[in-house]
Image (cartoon, rainbow, N blue to C red):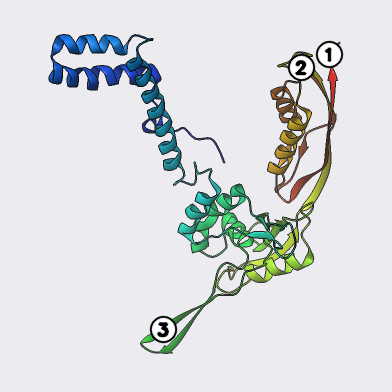
Amino acid sequence: MSKIKIPQILTVEKFADMRERFINDFFLPHAEKEVGNEKARNLTAGLRSPNESAALLLDAMILFRQQETRNDNYKYLQHFAKTVTDSEMVDVVVSRLGLKRQIIKAGDDTVSPNIPAVKESDASLLHRYSLAPYGLATTGTRSGYKFHAMTLGARPLITISSESDNVVTQRFEFTPTEGVIRPKDAKARMLKKNSGEVEIRILSPEGNGQASQKLQDEVLEYCRRPDIAQESDHISVRSASIKPYKIEIEAWEETAPTRLIDEEALEQALRDYTEQQHKLGAKIQRSRISQIAHNHNATKLNILQPSADLVCEWFEAPYCQEVDVHVKANR
């Protein structure tokens, strides 16, 4: 999810500004009305004295109000696909377009301890949500092919028949989707200009992303359906071409309490980067690896692998086989 600018209305007022606004705009006018100008001024002076109990109480009230404002702002931001971060609210947001979170691997509650189901990530679900408007049309556009391939089986089979001169029936046939494995990513291109020969490449959510023949066949059958496919297109489906690589780095740290490298955290950050880039047409950049390492206190870095940036074509996807970090101390 890209970072967006939070509207001014959802920012929290500074502590000092909020405190003074409360005193000048609310407390002082109220006190003058209740006890007169002179006494009100004396009470107001107490609110500005750090050791007065009333001042401490006001500080606590302002801090409480700021936190409540942050909590309310967080709730407001959960209503929009661009800013939602709570997983349960992600499910609510995408339900507006009839989408549901996919089950990647079923759980097992017959064993102890129970094995939880592996579910689609928030990022993947929100990505499909952003493509969902293309579901209102058939294939044809690149995004249309992408949507239908990634939502395999979700669209009911739509048929239209004429019962009489005055009656036309549109029939929706829903098929079970439980246990359906859907592509993690998909891209489509016309192989030869104006030929109608459209090739769809798909990335599996399992293993290194190599799509099984079964998944390829299911996507092909689905995208060739008469209520989805373009009549002028000849569609073929193939697996993404997987480009394996490894990340191996030597990172030097400064031997000071706040400058040490958390090796486990650095490895996890690199794995997160590789997972984000496990998609069609992605690239693995040495500069990003360097940036991540320096963000985790590396003072010097030697990237052993990859030896150069890994840049994928539209039909290729990078897959990281291993992340290996060697932390060394500066001498």
User: Is 76 above or below relative to 192?
Assistant: above
- Of tags 2 and 3, the one toward the viewer is 2
Which of marks 3 and 2 precedes in the sequence? 3
Which of marks 3 and 1 precedes in the sequence? 3
Q: Secondary structure at mark 2?
A: loop
**Quarter of image, res 235:** bottom right
Q: Quadrant of the C terminus?
A: top right
> Residue, x 75% and y 26% (percent of image)?
262
Residue 191 horizontal side relative to residue 32, left or right: right
Q: Position of residue 21 (x, y in %)?
A: 29, 19
Q: Residues within 10 Å of mark 2 (few under 14, many from 20)?
A: some
Which residue is outermost to the front?
A: 53
Which of marks 1 and 2 precedes in the sequence? 2
Q: Amino acid at mark 1?
A: Asn
Q: Amino acid at mark 3?
A: Val
The residue under label 3 is 168
Q: Residues within 10 Å of mark 3 (few under 14, many from 20)?
A: few
The residue under label 1 is 330
Residue closer to the observer: 227 or 82? 82
Residue 328 horizontal side relative to residue 144, left or right: right
Q: Position of residue 179 (x, y in %)?
A: 67, 67
> Residue, x 84% and y 38% (percent of image)?
246
**Marks 1/3: CA distance?**
79 Å
The numbered disc on residue 299 is 2
Do labels 2 and 1 touch, CB within 8 Å?
yes
**Marks 2/3: CA distance?**
72 Å
